[in-house]
Amino acid sequence: MKKALLIFFALLPFSFATTGTTIKSSIPLTLDRASLWMGIYNELNLESTGLRKEVFDYALRGLQKNPFPKSVLSIVDLSQPSSKKRLYVIDLDAHKLLFQTYVAHGRNSGELMAATFSNTASSFQSSLGFYQTLGTYQGKHGLSLQLKGLERGFNDNAFSRAIVIHGADYVCEDFIRRTGRLGRSQGCPAVDNAVSKGIIQAIKGGSCVFVYSPNPDYLQKSTFLL
């Protein structure tokens, strides 16, 4: 564990001309910062929110594999049903849970539970793994946030598939009361319109998004979890 924590992220500039957004260089992940982040799970009592320690630990492991310029971590926990608030947005340096809210999965990934996943265009399925947030734009769903999939074979087609974070009418408690689940997207991690702008502003510009499911193929092959 100590060896893993002694990883320092290189200072790398990021510039994405397609989004019109320049992402600043990352801050090195020192042993002290990593140790503090490991304690956040207990400090914020995240177990009581439904987020398992194993999932949080996976997310921190992935943070050590890529230089994320922004120390805000978003976890989409697809091991939980869509009727649960399974999106967690955590400010790691401030030790604060910024949001816990609903998030949709792809329509072809399942109904209440997401069970199947794809990296293929027009699959209308969710893609697992680690993403980096890019810039925003105004689309058919209003303010939306572009994502860069970082894991080859699992989510690296996210940008070309237009997998983005956006608000949606079908992500709300009224939809759950009527159907027993959220509505589903075309593969995007869509969120409640009431909080979409706040979430997007908090995580845009180079933060980490981790979409998790206990999928054996992903857990065995992801280089971010090795």
Image: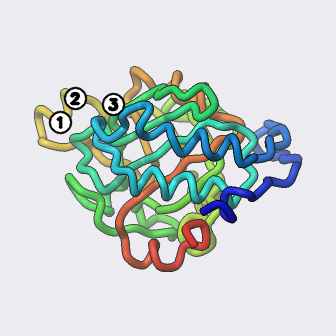
Disc 2 from disc 3: Cα separation: 10 Å
> How many residues crowd mark 2 within 10 Å: few (<14), some (14–19), many (20+)?
some
Q: Which residue is mark 3?
A: 169
Of the residues tagged 3 and 1, which is closer to the observer? 1
Identify the mark at residue 105; answer none if there is no mark. none
Task: Answer whether labels 3 and 1 touch (C-beta < 8 Å).
Answer: no
> How many residues crowd mark 1 within 10 Å: few (<14), some (14–19), many (20+)?
some
Left or right, 190 with respect to 84, comes to right
Q: Amino acid at mark 1?
A: Ile
Q: Position of residue 140 (x, y in %)?
A: 51, 34
Disc 2 from disc 1: Cα separation: 5 Å
Question: In what element is the residue under mark 3?
Answer: loop
Q: Position of residue 165 (x, y in %)?
A: 52, 40
> How many residues crowd mark 3 within 10 Å: few (<14), some (14–19), many (20+)?
some
Q: Residue at x 65, y 49 (%)?
A: 132
Disc 3 from disc 1: Cα separation: 12 Å
Question: In what element is the residue under mark 1?
Answer: helix
Q: Amino acid at mark 3?
A: Asp
Which quadrant: the C terminus?
A: bottom right
Which quadrant: the N terminus?
A: bottom right
Task: Answer whether labels 2 and 1 touch (C-beta < 8 Å).
Answer: yes
Q: Which residue is mark 1?
A: 176
Q: Quadrant of residue 84?
A: top left
Question: In what element is the residue under mark 2?
Answer: helix
Q: Position of residue 28 (x, y in %)?
A: 80, 46
Q: Residue at x 63, y 72 (%)?
A: 152
Q: Quadrant of residue 103?
A: top left
Identify the mark at residue 173; answer none if there is no mark. 2
| Upstream in sequence: badge 3 or badge 1 | 3
- Position above or below: 153 against 123: below
